[in-house]
Each structure stands twice: as C-alpha cells, then as structure tokens.
Amino acid sequence: MTPTITAFEASPDRGRGLARDMQVRWALEEVGQPYDVRLVSFKQMKEPLHLAVHPFGQIPTYEDGDLALFESASIVLYIAEHHPGLLPADTAGRARIITWMFAAGDSVKAPIIEREGAILTERDKPWHAERLPMLDQRVHARLAQLSARLGDADWLEGAFSAADIMMVGLLRRPACSDLLQDHPNLVAYVARAESRPAFQRAFDAQLAVFTDQSKGDQR
Ligand code: GTB
C-alpha cells in the first residue's frame, strides 16, 4: 500500500523545506518508498478528521492502511524500521541511531528552540538585546559539543542514517543555521546531507507545493 503523509497546503516557510514533512519526505525518498501527500489548510488541521490522526492538529502525519502516526521522529523511525538503509541491523547500532534521534529532538533542540522563541516573540522587549547573546551562547555551546563529536566523520554514526535526517532537519532551522558558521564541520555536514539525491527530491517535492500554490494565487 502507498502511505499518505500530510503537509501544509500553504507552508509559511514558502518552500524552504523547514516544515517537518520535509524529514518524512526525505526518509521515504532515501528508502525508495513512493508516497501520496494530502495537503491540509490551517483550518482543516484543527478539524475532527485531522485531529483523529494528529491529536495536536499539526502536520506531518503518516497513514498506511490501519496505521496512523504523528511526530516526525516517530514516523522517520517507523520508515527506517520497515525498510533497509536508515538503521543498522545490529541492536546496539540501532540503539545508537535512536539515541541520536532523541538528541536531535531534545538535548540539541532545546537551546535552539529557546533562541527561536526569543527571536520570534521577544524582539520588542527592552531586555531582548541583553538576553539574546546568552541564548546564542547556549546554542554555540551545544553546537560545539556536537561538532567535537562529529569531528571529521561524514555522518553521526558510521553510515548515513535516520539520525542524520533528524539532526540535519534541526540544524537547517534558521535559529540554528545562522550560528552554524563557527562550526565548519557542521556546515559541511549539512551541505553533504543536502546534496544527497533523496534530500533534493524531497526538497523539490515540497517546493513544488509552494510554487503551484503561488501560480494559483496569480490566476
Ligand atoms: N514535534 C512535531 C513533529 O516533529 O512532527 C512538531 C510538528 C509541528 O510543529 N508541526 C507544525 C504545524 O503543523 C509544522 S512544522 N504547525 C501548525 C499548527 O501548529 O497549527 C513547524 C514549522 C512551521 C513553520 C515553519 N516555517 O514557516 O519556517 C517551520 C517549521
């Protein structure tokens, strides 16, 4: 059966591949699994039909027969578990990849989200200029640790894996990518990931949604 994922009908990122359907598309492209996409509006996301699949009324979701999943990391892990290529065969190797997936959604993400929130919502506050360098420093500290661990390796744990999809998805967020320049091996890591044919196909597919929608708006 062909799985169906959901994505923004009109992504606020204007096709930059920052919404979380990008990671799901990328994983599906890496394993060569064709998929359908159901585009949803912000209104539809909050309606019962979509809430039945996603309790928080968000994208992405993943449906395959009776199975309905939400949370991009969980979806990527499911795809990796059911297709060869994104998880090693041995138990310990799989556990290490899953650990990195958790790190991308927790330890590394936390300071990035805090900085993102401050930039988006606290710009007009009198204390913003004083607080921002502290938040920058927290992101830098975590990126420095990640950079030290990656060293001159191509990927987080040996071969390219589901962990790289989730980590690169995080590092591409603007609240992180604008601080990445101090860590050249992380810049190269993201560029290496973005040059993968599967990434490109996923990126082009989500960009096409924005391009088609813009054409529609002009008509
Ligand atoms: N933890 C969940 C996951 O990983 O799946 C987070 C899901 C999530 O945040 N979904 C967002 C959403 O549906 C889209 S991706 N938002 C609509 C809503 O909550 O009503 C987050 C996102 C949104 C916009 C941009 N952007 O414009 O750059 C980037 C990322």
Image (tube, rainbow, N blue to C red):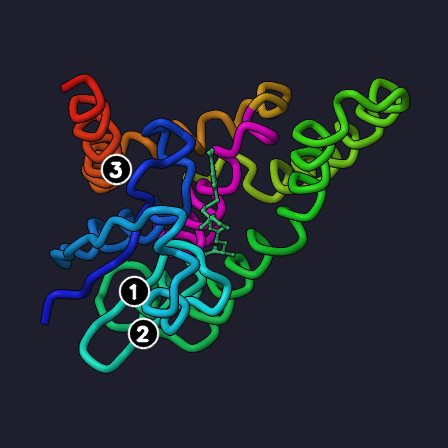
Which quarter of the figure is the N terminus placed in?
bottom left
Using a 10 Å C-alpha cutoff, classify the residue at mark 3 as few (fewer than 14 neighbours), some (14 to 19) or many (20 or more): many
The verdict on residue 163 being magenta is: yes
Asked whether the beta carbons under mark 1 and mark 2 sit within 8 Å of each other, the answer is yes
Task: Say the numbered circle drawn on residue 206.
Answer: 3
Amino acid on which the number 2 mark rests in the picture: Ala
Looking at the image, which is closer to me, 217 or 23? Answer: 217
Residue at the extreme bottom of the image, as rendered:
66
Looking at the image, which is closer to me, 48 or 127? Answer: 48
Which contiguous range is marked in magenta? 155-177
Task: Tell me if residue 193 can be seen.
Answer: no
Task: Say the numbered circle drawn on residue 85.
Answer: none
The verdict on residue 156 being magenta is: yes
- Disc 2 residue lies near ligand 1 with CB under 8 A: no
User: Which x, y percent locates residue 124?
Assistant: 78, 20
Amino acid on which the number 3 mark rests in the picture: Gln
Which residue is disc 1 drawn over? 62
Name the secondary structure under disc 2.
strand
**Disc 1 or 2, which lies upstream in sequence?**
1
User: Which x, y percent locates residue 206?
Assistant: 25, 37
Q: Write down the quadrant of residue 214 in the picture.
A: top left
The residue at 20%/62% (across/down) is: 4
The residue at 22%/35% (across/down) is: 209
- Disc 3 residue lies near ligand 1 with CB under 8 A: no
The residue at 58%/19% (across/down) is: 181
Task: Tell me if residue 114 can be seen.
Answer: yes
Which residue is disc 2 drawn over? 68
Q: CA distance from mark 3 to mark 2?
A: 21 Å
